Image: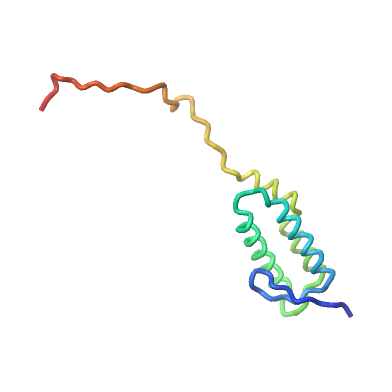
Amino acid sequence: MKKTLTANISGTVFHVEEDAYEALQRYLAALRAQFSGSEGCDEIMADIEARVAELLQERLDGRQVVTTAEVDHVIGVLGKPEDISEEAGAFVDEEPSPASGSAPRGSKRLFRDPDDRW
C-alpha cells in the first residue's frame, strides 16, 4: 500500500501517489526554472499545467490514483525541460531584416509646383 496525496493541477483535483507527486513536482520546478527569465512565465506554466491535467485525465480512464507510470507518460509526451526550451526558442519572433529593395534610401524633400494650381 502506498501513500497518496491530493493535488490540484490547473483546477482539477487528483489523488497522486507520493513518488509520482515528487516526480511531477521536480518536473514542474525544472520547467519553471527554465522559463523563469522569459516573458510570460506564469502564462506558460499555467498552459503546461493545464495540458498535464488534460493528459492525466485521459490516462486515468476511470481510475482514481495517479501513479508514476502516468507521470512518466506525461513527461514523455510533453518532453524534457531542455527540449521544450529549445523548441520554444525556435518560435521566438525575430526582427524582420529589411529586404534590399524595400530599404528607405533617405528622406525625400517635397516641393510645391506653383504652376499646377486649381
Q: Position of residue 95 (x, y in %)?
A: 54, 37
Q: Position of residue 42 (x, y in %)?
A: 63, 58
Picture residue at 81% right of the left edge, 72% below the top: 67
Residue ranking furthest to the left: 118
Give the position of the C terminus as an image quadrant. Answer: top left
- Answer left or right for 103 relative to 72: left
Total numbered badges shown on the rendered structure: 0
Q: Judge from the rendering whether residue 85 lies leftward or rightward of residue 96; answer left or right.
A: right
Q: Is residue 27 above or below residue 2?
A: above
Residue 35 sits above or below residue 26 on the image: above
In the image, what residue occupies the spot 69% across and 65% down? Answer: 52
Q: Horizontal placement of 109 versus 46: left or right? A: left
Q: What sort of colour scheme is used for the picture?
A: rainbow
Q: Residue furthest front?
A: 37
Looking at the rendering, in which quadrant would you find the N terminus? bottom right
From this view, report whether residue 88 is shown above or below residue 53.
Answer: above
Please give the name of the residue rendered at 87% of the width and 77% of the height, measured from the top-left corner: 2
Question: For residue 32, which quarter of the picture?
Answer: bottom right
In the picture provided, is 49 more to the left or to the right than 94?
right
- Residue 25 falls in image quadrant: bottom right
Instruction: Indicate the position of residue 107 as horizontal and vertical percent values.
Output: 37, 23
Q: Using the image as rendered, state which of residue 96 and residue 40 is in the foreground.
A: 40
